[in-house]
Image (cartoon, grey):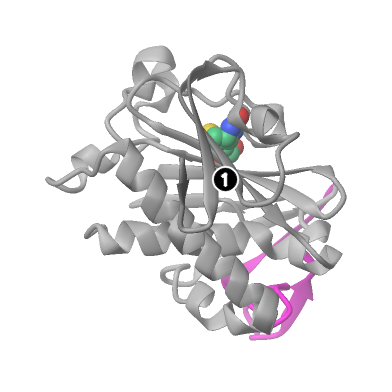
C-alpha cells in the first residue's frame, strides 16, 4: 500500500518488524499483526500479541546527530497522533517511551542496520492484552482501548502515525532538531527527579527538558545544570 509518501508492507506474523524492515529503502514501513520475537530496548523481549500496533518505518538519516535524537522526533509523531485521538495526557519519558500516568502506552526502538538509514520500531498497546502473556506487565501497561471510546482501526492508526512521522522528519531535515525542540519539550510533563546511568556512573537530579541540540539537561538542588549528549546516557530512571 502506498500513502502519504510511504510504502507499507503488511504481514500476519513476523519475528520482528524492525528486522523485516532492515533491508527496505527509505520511506518503507512494515506492519505485522503479531511478532514472534518482538524486540525491546536492552535486549528485552516485547510482547506483541494480536490487537496491538507493531510497526517499523525506514527513515533516511543524515548526520549522526540526527540519528541520536531520532527517538525524540519519533516520540513527537506518536504523541501528536495520540493527542489527535483525544489522549491528551500522553507524555514522553526520555528517550523512548510514551506513558499515560506512568503506564507504558508505546515503546520505540531505533535500529541502524545500514549507514544513512534508521529503522524506527513503534509498538503501541491498542486492544491487545499483553498481561495475558506476561503477568508482570499488568500494572505497567496502558492501552488505547482503555483511554478512548473511538479506537481507530490498526490500518488508520498506521496511516496517522506515518503521516505525522513523515512531517516531523521532513521538518527536522529542513530545520534541524532545534525546529522541533520546543514541541518535544512540551511532552515531558512536569519536571521529574531522575537517576541517570552514564555507563556505570550514576547521577541524580531533576529532568525537565532537552536543549536545542538534543542534549539532556539535568539540574541539581542548587539549580546548576549539566547537559549530556544522548549517547552518554545509557539509562534514565524516574525516581
Ligand atoms: C521498548 O520499549 O523497549 C521498545 C519496544 C519497541 C517495540 C516495537 S514493536 C515494533 C518494532 N519491532 C520490534 O521488534 N520492536 C519494535
Residue 20 position in % (x across, y down): 66, 28
Residue 204 drawn in magenta: yes
Q: Mark 1 Cα within 10 Å, few/some/many (few <14, many 20+)?
A: many
What residue lies at 61% left-to-right and 18% top-to-bottom? 15
Name the residue that disc number 1 marks: 108
Picture quadrant where residue 40 is located:
top right
- In depth, the one of 131 and 67 nearer the eye is 67
Q: Residue furthest front?
A: 2
- In the rendered image, the vertical position of residue 112 relative to residue 12, given as above or below: below
Q: Main secondary structure of the magenta part?
A: strand
- In depth, the one of 55 and 159 nearer the eye is 159
- In the rendered image, the vertical position of residue 17 relative to residue 224, given as above or below: above
Q: Residue furthest left?
A: 149
- SS label for mark 1: strand
Residue 194 drawn in magenta: no
Residue 175 position in % (x across, y down): 66, 84
Residue 144 position in % (x across, y down): 27, 42
What residue lies at 31% left-to-right and 45% top-to-bottom? 156
Q: How many marks?
A: 1
Q: In terms of image quarters, where does ligand 1 lie?
A: top right
What range of the chain is rendered magenta? 200-229
* Left or right of 18, for residue 91: left
Disc 1 C-beta below 8 A from ligand 1: yes
* Left or right of 50, for residue 92: right
Please say whether residue 131 is visible from this viewpoint.
yes
Residue 149 position in % (x across, y down): 12, 45
Please say whether residue 103 is visible from this viewpoint.
no
* Left or right of 234, for residue 164: left
Amino acid at each position: 500500500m502506498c500513502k502519504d509518501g510511504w510504502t507499507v508492507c503488511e504481514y500476519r506474523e513476523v519475528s520482528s518488524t524492525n528486522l523485516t524492515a532492515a533491508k527496505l529503502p527509505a520511506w518503507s514501513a512494515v506492519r505485522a499483526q503479531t511478532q514472534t520475537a518482538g524486540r525491546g530496548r536492552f535486549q528485552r523481549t516485547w510482547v506483541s500479541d494480536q490487537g496491538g500496533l507493531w510497526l517499523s518505518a525506514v527513515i533516511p538519516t543524515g548526520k549522526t546527530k540526527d540519528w541520536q535524537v531520532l527517538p525524540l522526533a519519533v516520540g513527537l509523531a506518536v504523541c501528536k497522533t495520540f493527542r489527535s485521538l483525544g489522549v491528551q495526557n500522553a507524555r514522553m519519558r526520555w528517550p523512548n517511551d510514551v506513558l499515560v500516568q506512568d503506564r507504558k502506552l508505546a515503546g520505540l526502538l531505533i535500529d541502524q542496520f545500514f549507514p544513512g538509514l534508521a529503522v524506527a520500531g513503534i509498538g503501541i498497546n491498542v486492544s491487545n492484552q499483553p498481561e495475558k502473556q506476561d503477568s508482570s506487565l499488568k500494572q505497567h501497561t496502558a492501552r488505547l482501548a482503555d483511554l478512548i471510546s473511538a479506537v481507530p482501526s490498526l490500518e488508520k492508526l498506521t496511516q496517522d502515525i506515518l503521516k505525522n512521522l513523515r512531517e516531523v522528519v521532513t521538518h527536522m531535515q529542513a530545520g534541524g532538531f532545534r525546529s522541533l525542540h520546543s514541541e518535544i519539550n512540551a511532552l515531558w510533563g512536569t519536571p521529574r527527579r531522575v537517576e541517570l546511568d552514564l555507563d556505570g556512573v550514576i547521577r541524580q537530579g531533576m529532568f525537565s527538558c532537552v536543549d536545542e541540540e538534543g542534549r539532556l539537561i539535568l539540574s541539581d538542588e542548587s539549580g546548576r545544570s549539566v547537559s549530556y549528549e544522548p549517547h552518554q546516557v545509557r539509562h534514565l530512571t524516574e525516581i
